[in-house]
Image (cartoon, rainbow, N blue to C red):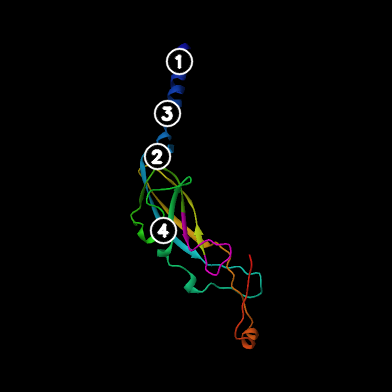
Amino acid sequence: MKKVIRQVMAWAALCGMMAGCSDEVFDRDGEGVGYLRLELGQVDVELSSTTKATSELPDELVPAKADFTIDIRQGNESVDDFPKKYSEIASSGIELKAGSYTVEASCGENEPLQEVPYFAGSPSVRVLPGQTVSEDIEVALANAMLVPAVSENLTKHYTDWTLTVEA
């Protein structure tokens, strides 16, 4: 009976050691390197309006993918050589230490109220040693744009007028 108990204890200890080491290599941040392959997905230009007028964002205000700035952050710190333009990022992937990152894609200035759109998106990714992780970044309109709808009657009767908006 003592022999059986010793064998069971040895087996349990061995299983415990194996379970404790099985994912240790993959969960430690900074050990080993992996690759992050980024793809800038669709630029969402959906607008909402509080008036009865329909709103559409003109095509000339929708930025090209090459105009977006990409920042890869670990915690509050940017990874070396970032931020940079999307057009400067190699399609083969970015070599990063294993760990968790936030990828921020943006285009434009994020002001409280403006005429020019600001687009942004920021997914979180986990880079594992020896693996390539692919991430699609979806960006959307991320600021409040003021586009006044002026009646044709106003423009017919007045040649010069000003609209002032205070935020």
Of tags 1 and 4, the one toward the viewer is 4
Label 2 to label 3, Cα distance in Å? 22 Å
Residue 26 or residue 100, whichever sits in front = 100
Of tags 2 and 3, the one toward the viewer is 2
* N-terminal-most mark, 2 or 1: 1
Which residue type carries mark 4? Glu
Q: Which residues, given as a range, are shown in magenta?
A: 104-117
Which residue type carries mark 2? Gly
Which residue type carries mark 1? Arg
Where in the figure is residue 162, as x and y percent of width and height? 61, 78
Residue assigned mark 3: 18
Q: Quadrant of residue 143?
A: bottom right
Residue assigned mark 1: 6
Give the secondary structure at mark 2: loop
Residue 136 or residue 19, whichever sits in front = 136
Label 3 to label 4, Cα distance in Å? 38 Å
Residue that lies at the very extreme toward the top in this rendered image: 2
Residue assigned mark 4: 39
Residue under the point 48% across and 46% down: 76
Which residue type carries mark 3? Met
Label 2, residues with CA under 10 Å away: few <14, some 14-19, many ≥20:
some
Where in the figure is residue 44, as x and y percent of width and height? 51, 65
Q: What secondary structure characterizes most of the magenta part?
A: loop
Is residue 60 shown above or below 87?
A: below
Is residue 160 shown above or below 13?
A: below
